[in-house]
Image: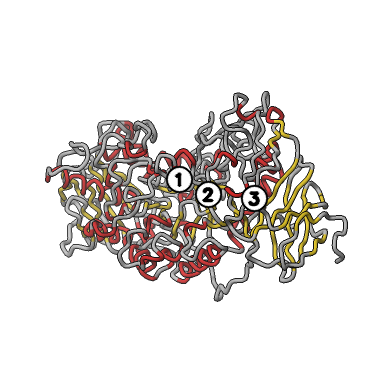
């Protein structure tokens, strides 16, 4: 290939001979072939593009500035020899600055490559990073001529070579999946057995101590809060706070550099890959929480970091009547324009990259309803879902939706198409209401316990479409859920106005920490009630890191800005009794396929006995009559799960059968006597869980069918009848 002789080399780096060739429009981003680096950038409305090379992260001036001459289908591209992996680069893009028409080109602003595989450095929040003059009476209609180069992170060319050592993805089926939501930094930051130099990093998550803990706990999938390169918001830094959660993405292909123990210069990619490899060796899947609904550039008054300066009118959803302003379905200032093929392609390329190159096993899509929107309405047959379903790579991993956004008609729980699982917000709310004693129908509780068939049974979906959770990163921890009636977010410095006001929580009689022994005992029981309900429900359980041992955030239900002891896991003060109980309940869940059914409960007679998969009972041993389901004052019920009614064939070709169980839920504040139902094999019943005293195991005492057992107020008892 001959050099592109028409290209204007504005400034060459010292002692490095580089040559510029036309290159290729694909793949987008920077790609090293062992000899040359190809650069490709999409911009439909640009008039000129300059590739800027840097010798150091904090370099104030480019070491070289290369005008890209080749444009193919709106992709600006060039191939350069004389450069190697580790090269720092960015872009300057020319075009009209007409905010009212959606265009915000400003070549004074250095821009991050949207396809950068690694990013070095952070944003220095100088006024120069804004495309307009801060303080001008014209606001964003003004034009800034200040160079933002010294204050903007630089993209890094990387070498993708990595020894995966024959890595094989665990490919755990949904019905065998137990998800653990964790934060890379917060999980190991205070862990006393992790070497201090790798705490809070990908290496810390890959450490044998971490993996041993996860295996002993019994989880099968680690769902990581955002690890795409994100931005620390200016207004938070000025308050002495930071963007801890990471829902402010600026690089959809780059692992967040600050989570690397090895520094910023591209090693974060290797460290992330090694983390995945080590987790896979232990049989643990890696699921990423991804934010494809918006970027870190905010609204019309936000900074110009990447997309806004490359082609604002293409990348973002703009208001139709005045394109100066952004359509905001996310509450963050902007929404990505997934209706445009190249923007949709960006998301698909990112997903494929993390699957094929980084070996991750699935994704949880933040505010996924935004991705379903066509014009303004949500549309589960939109182009985003169509492309996902036909893609032979993306369609084969776990796809989990947060099925809502902040826009009108954005609450889509139960409405995502087949192939998707959903965070079941109705499960969370119903279970919280049941155990705090709020007015709620038993029918609602029963539906959630059985996998929410009212939401997912239609359209050939299975119980595993429901991701069941009591808590998540957003909201109270499990301990705080039973310790606070009100949020306490004063440390966020927003006058306690941020965070959800309605938490469906109950403090058990006193707000916050108390020395009242009865209240503390009740709180322990309530935590065990929630954990037992979660892991014995049909569907896929999700546990939040630290809930298994009583982590607290002091009543803060919106710790997005707290990169400190409020959010970090306090390993030194872990409740070991609660941890032991949690491990025991998870073990029962994993050991017995009754709690991990692939199909819905059905009322089909088993071997002519008249028994069905599931029967609901009143305390006196009678089946639950229809009218009781609508009572909002009834707080207790027994449920018989027939282990012979699983009705499926295992992967070894043998029929799956299990022990039978009788579970008694008593949310009433007084003890109740329950008559035990007949069993299939006449072996009697044995207690395996009692949340009133924290017992989990298998008692030797045998209870005969027809005998009574007392269930303490606000507690769960689980009885097992062996085959």
Which residue is the site of mark 1? 243
Query: Is the C-beta separation of discs 1 and 3 under 8 Å?
Result: no
Q: Residue 147 got which mark?
A: none
| Sooner in the amino-acid sequence: mark 1 or mark 3 | 3
Q: Please give the name of the residue rendered at 71% of the width and 55% of the height, measured from the top-left corner.
A: 28
What x and y, as percent, mark residue 542? 40, 52
Q: Please give the name of the residue rendered at 50% of the width and 38% of the height, measured from the top-left corner.
A: 404
Q: In the depicted view, which residue is nearer to us: 580 or 76? A: 76
Whether residue 653 is visible: no
Q: In the depicted view, which residue is nearer to us: 471 or 245? A: 245
| Sooner in the amino-acid sequence: mark 2 or mark 1 | 2
Q: In the depicted view, which residue is nearer to us: 181 or 428? A: 181
Query: Is the C-beta separation of discs 2 and 1 under 8 Å?
Result: yes
Determine whether, in the image, residue 555 is placed left or right of residue 473: left
Separation of residues labelled 2 and 1 (CA atoms)? 9 Å
Q: Residue 230 got which mark?
A: 2
Query: Is the C-beta separation of discs 2 and 3 under 8 Å?
Result: no
Crowd tier of the residue under label 3, counting other residues whose Cα lies within 10 Å: few below 14, some 14–19, many 20 or above: many
Q: Tell me the SS state at disc 3.
A: loop
| Sooner in the amino-acid sequence: mark 2 or mark 3 | 3
Determine whether, in the image, residue 674 is placed left or right of residue 178: left
Q: Tell me the SS state at disc 2.
A: strand
């Amino acid at each position: 290939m001959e050099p592109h002789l028409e290209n204007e080399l504005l400034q060459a780096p010292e002692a490095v001979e580089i040559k510029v060739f036309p290159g290729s429009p694909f793949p987008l981003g920077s790609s090293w072939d062992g000899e040359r680096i190809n650069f490709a950038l999409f911009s439909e409305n640009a008039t000129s593009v300059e590739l800027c090379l840097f010798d150091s992260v904090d370099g104030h001036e480019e070491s070289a500035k290369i005008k890209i001459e080749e444009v193919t289908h709106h992709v600006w591209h060039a191939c350069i020899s004389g450069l190697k992996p580790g090269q720092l680069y960015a872009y300057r893009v020319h075009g009209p600055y007409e905010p009212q028409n959606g265009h915000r080109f400003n070549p004074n602003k250095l821009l991050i490559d949207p396809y950068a595989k690694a990013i070095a450095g952070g944003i220095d929040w100088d006024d120069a990073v804004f495309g307009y003059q801060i303080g001008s009476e014209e606001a964003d209609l003004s034009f800034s001529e200040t160079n933002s180069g010294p204050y903007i992170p630089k993209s890094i060319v990387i070498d993708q070579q990595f020894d995966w050592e024959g890595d094989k993805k665990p490919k755990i089926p949904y019905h065998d999946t137990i998800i653990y939501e964790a934060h890379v930094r917060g999980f190991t930051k205070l862990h006393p057995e992790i070497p201090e130099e790798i705490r809070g990093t990908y290496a810390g998550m890959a450490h044998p101590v971490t993996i041993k803990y996860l295996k002993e706990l019994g989880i099968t999938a680690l769902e990581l809060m955002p690890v795409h390169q994100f931005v620390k918001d200016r207004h938070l830094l000025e308050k002495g706070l930071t963007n801890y959660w990471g829902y402010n993405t600026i690089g959809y292909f780059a692992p967040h550099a600050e989570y690397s123990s090895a520094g910023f210069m591209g090693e974060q990619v290797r460290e992330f890959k090694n983390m995945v490899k080590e987790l896979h060796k232990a049989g643990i899947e890696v699921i990423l929480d991804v934010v494809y609904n918006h970027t870190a550039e905010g609204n019309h008054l936000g900074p110009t970091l990447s997309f806004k300066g490359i082609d604002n009118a293409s990348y973002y959803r703009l208001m139709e009547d005045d394109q100066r302003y952004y359509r905001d379905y996310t509450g963050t200032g902007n929404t990505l324009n997934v209706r445009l093929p190249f923007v949709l392609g960006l998301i698909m390329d990112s997903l494929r990259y993390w699957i094929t190159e980084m070996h991750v096993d699935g994704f949880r899509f933040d505010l996924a309803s935004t991705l379903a929107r066509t014009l303004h309405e949500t549309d589960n047959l939109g182009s985003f879902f169509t492309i996902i379903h036909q893609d032979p790579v993306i369609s084969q991993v776990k796809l989990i939706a947060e099925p809502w956004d902040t826009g009108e008609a954005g609450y889509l729980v139960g409405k995502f198409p087949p192939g998707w699982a959903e965070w079941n917000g109705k499960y969370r709310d119903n279970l919280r209401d049941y155990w705090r004693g709020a007015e709620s129908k038993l029918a609602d509780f029963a539906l959630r316990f059985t996998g929410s068939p009212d939401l997912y049974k239609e359209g050939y979906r299975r119980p595993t479409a429901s991701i069941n959770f009591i808590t998540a990163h957003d909201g109270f921890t499990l301990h705080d859920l039973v310790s606070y009636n009100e949020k306490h977010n004063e440390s966020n410095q927003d006058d306690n106005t941020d965070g959800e006001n309605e938490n469906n929580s109950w403090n058990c009689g006193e707000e916050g920490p108390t020395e009242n022994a009865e209240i503390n005992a009740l709180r322990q029981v309530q935590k065990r009630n929630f954990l037992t309900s979660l892991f014995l429900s049909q569907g896929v359980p999700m546990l939040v890191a630290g809930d298994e041992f009583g982590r607290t955030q002091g009543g803060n239900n919106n710790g997005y800005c707290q990169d400190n002891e409020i959010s970090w896991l306090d390993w030194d003060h872990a409740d070991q009794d609660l941890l032991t109980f949690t491990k025991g309940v998870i073990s029962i869940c994993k050991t017995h396929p009754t709690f991990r059914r692939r199909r819905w409960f059905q009322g089909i007679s088993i071997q002519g006995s008249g028994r069905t998969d599931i029967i609901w009972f009143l305390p006196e041993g009678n089946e639950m009559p229809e009218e009781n389901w609508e009572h909002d004052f009834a707080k207790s019920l027994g449920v018989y799960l027939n282990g012979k009614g699983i009705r499926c064939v295992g992967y070894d070709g043998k029929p799956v059968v299990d022990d039978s169980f009788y579970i008694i839920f008593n949310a009433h504040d007084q003890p109740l006597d329950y008559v035990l139902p007949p069993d299939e094999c006449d072996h009697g019943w044995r207690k395996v869980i009692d949340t009133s005293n924290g017992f989990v195991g298998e008692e030797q005492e045998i209870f005969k069918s027809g005998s009574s057992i007392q269930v303490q107020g606000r507690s769960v008892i689980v009885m097992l009848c062996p085959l």
